[in-house]
Amino acid sequence: MPMTIDEVFAALTDLRARQRLVQNITNFVSMSVSANALLALGASPAMVHAEEEVGDFAKLADALVVNIGTLSPAWLRAMKKAAEAMGEQQKPWVLDPVATGATPYRSEAASTLLSLRPTIVRGNASEIMSLAGEAGALGKGVDSLAASDQAIAAAKALARTSGSIVAVTGATDYATDGDEVISVTGGHALMPRSTALGCALSACVAAFSAVRPPLEAATAGLAVYAAAGRIAGERCVNGPGHLPAELCDALFRMDKDLLAAHCGLGTGRGEEE
């Protein structure tokens, strides 16, 4: 059964009270957006990516998000060190496999990081399909040409083989442990028009992973963000320019009534394998 709105809001309340420290190894484009979203949510962001300190900092962090958007060999080494440190300490970490499948280097990097057993993998349909090994995953750079419901079977298969919770996002979001599939509705059509909002979502999911078990964390992160995205989009009547700021305001103001009014939770019904 999916989480209830009451359970999602309880997770958000817990996160706000505990102010969990989230280490971010993310891309240049998303650093500010992710940090502000985490602060608005009630978490504490740290944008730490130097190879020389990521392992030590992982000992201080409550959760980690690894985002491969702007890859380099040094950053990839840092990502591996941080992920290994989180694994050794049995702390949660989230992999955002940005544009995996676009180039061999990027695909190899994502596969290497996946082998380090992330707690949660969060990506769009093309990224999840590519990471699951599906031929012909439809992607255009960082954007998906496939709908999220087309990736449900791939997400379930990836969850089973990796041991990670897999969250595939789009018009409807889905989270799965390989058996159960939870759907989350909300968001707004303007969101793909504003850069780095998906990256910030992965950071928010990482924050929830510090206060809830993985499938609950993924569901709560998707739900709160979907509600905030819908609220923000409805306020941006002239276009997406102010969407990141409106999103942060919506995350900050989020309460149980807003959650109930702007997102929906259900059981995903995708194609069976």
Image: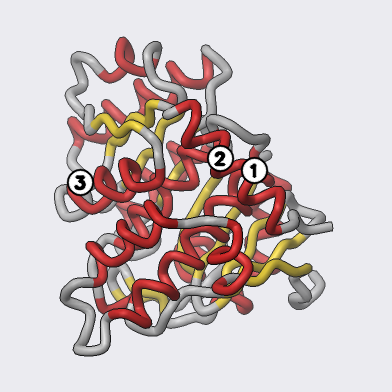
Residue 26 locus on image (x, y percent): 26, 43
Horizontal side, residue 44 vs residue 175: left or right: left
Horizontal side, residue 6 vs residue 69: left or right: right
Which residue is located at x 81 percent, y 73 percent? 272
Q: Which residue is mark 3?
A: 31
Residue 140 locus on image (x, y percent): 32, 77
Q: Which residue is mark 1?
A: 10
Residue 230 locus on image (x, y percent): 44, 75
Query: Between 96 and 76, which is closer to the camera in this rendering?
Result: 96
Which residue is located at x 39 percent, y 84 percent? 189
Residue 99 lies in quadrant: bottom left
> Which dot marks residue 13?
2
User: In the rendered structure, are the residues bearing label 2 and label 1 in contact, judged by CB atoms less than 8 Å apart?
Assistant: yes
Amino acid marked by disc 2: Thr
Q: Element type at marker 1? A: helix
In this view, which residue lies farthest toward the bottom? Answer: 238
N-term mark: 3 or 1: 1
For label 3, the crowd category at 10 Å Cα-Cα, with few meaning under 14, some 14 to 19 and many 20 or more, is: some
